Amino acid sequence: MIRVAIADDQTLIRATLATTLGLEDDLEVVAQAGTVAAAVAVTGEHAPNVLLLDVQMPAGGLDVEDGLDALPLIAAASPGTRVIVLTTFGRPGYLRRAMEAGAVGFLVKDTPVDRLIEGIRRAASGLRVVDPDLAAASLSIGASPLSEREALVLAASAGGASTGEIAGAVHLSEGTVRNYLSAAIGKLGARNRAEALRSATDNGWI
């Protein structure tokens, strides 16, 4: 029996997945979570063979930006659990981040059910499960050109935050923030920070 946990902040999606997977003779849903913190907790408690992990979830008290940031915590809580990232956001940068952080699979939520079920079985048996279109896109786009600080500052600019507001949020001087924003805009070939933010977000680099 393959023991599965589901981490997704949308209750309906969790319930639908749990019901669907429960119809399979060899799959058992042993836990569900709606926040990143809960995902780490139930993984540690139940040690599932496979965890289906959403990207965009509330932190639930953890100092993380999304589900991908929690992958090292999940691995520490249950080293034997194999993680398949299951997300609405099919971004090549997310795929690269997920694989570098230890996930064994990456699928989008419109993946056919039979492919998802087969993916769970493959992951449990030690194989990787990756959406082929995303894999190709990830290879063609490559790694993020942004440094960690450039990505941090660019992400903090979302919503039209002023330079002063960004500086306060990331604990840097306004001059340093302007330098990082300028560097990010140049590296992404953008005309302004809004365009740079959109490019980085679309590619999953922030």
Image (cartoon, helix red, strand yellow):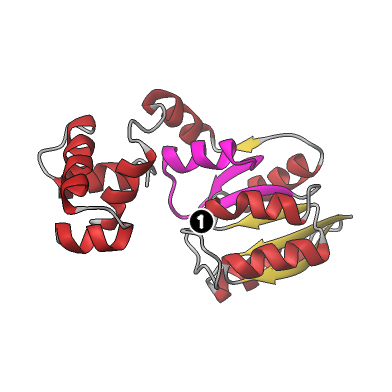
How packed is label 1: few (under 14 Cα within 10 Å), some, or many (20 or more)?
many
| Outermost residue, left side | 191
Q: Secondary structure at mark 1?
A: loop
Q: Position of residue 87 (x, y in %)?
A: 51, 54
| Outermost residue, right side | 1
Name the residue rendered at 46%, 58% in the picture.
Answer: 65
User: Going by the image, does 118 lie left or right of 143?
Assistant: right
Residue where numbered disc 1 is placed: 55
What is the three-letter code of the residue carrying label 1? Val
Q: Position of residue 117 (x, y in %)?
A: 71, 50
Height in image: 29 above or below 90? below
Quadrant of residue 29 in the image? bottom right
User: Going by the image, does 171 lie left or right of 79?
Assistant: left
Q: Position of residue 182 (x, y in %)?
A: 16, 39
Height in image: 12 above or below 185? below
Name the residue rendered at 51%, 60% in the picture.
Answer: 64
Q: Position of residue 96 (x, y in %)?
A: 50, 36
Answer whether residue 137 is magenta in the image.
Answer: no
In terms of depth relative to the viewer, which is nearer, 196 or 17?
196
Name the residue rendered at 30%, 62% in the picture.
Answer: 169
Height in image: 61 above or below 199? below
Name the residue rendered at 79%, 36% in the picture.
Answer: 126
User: Going by the image, does 28 lie left or right of 197?
Assistant: right
Quadrant of residue 17 in the image? bottom right
In terms of depth relative to the viewer, which is nearer, 113 or 154?
154
One can see residue 59 in this view: yes
Q: Please give the range of residues in magenta.
A: 82-110
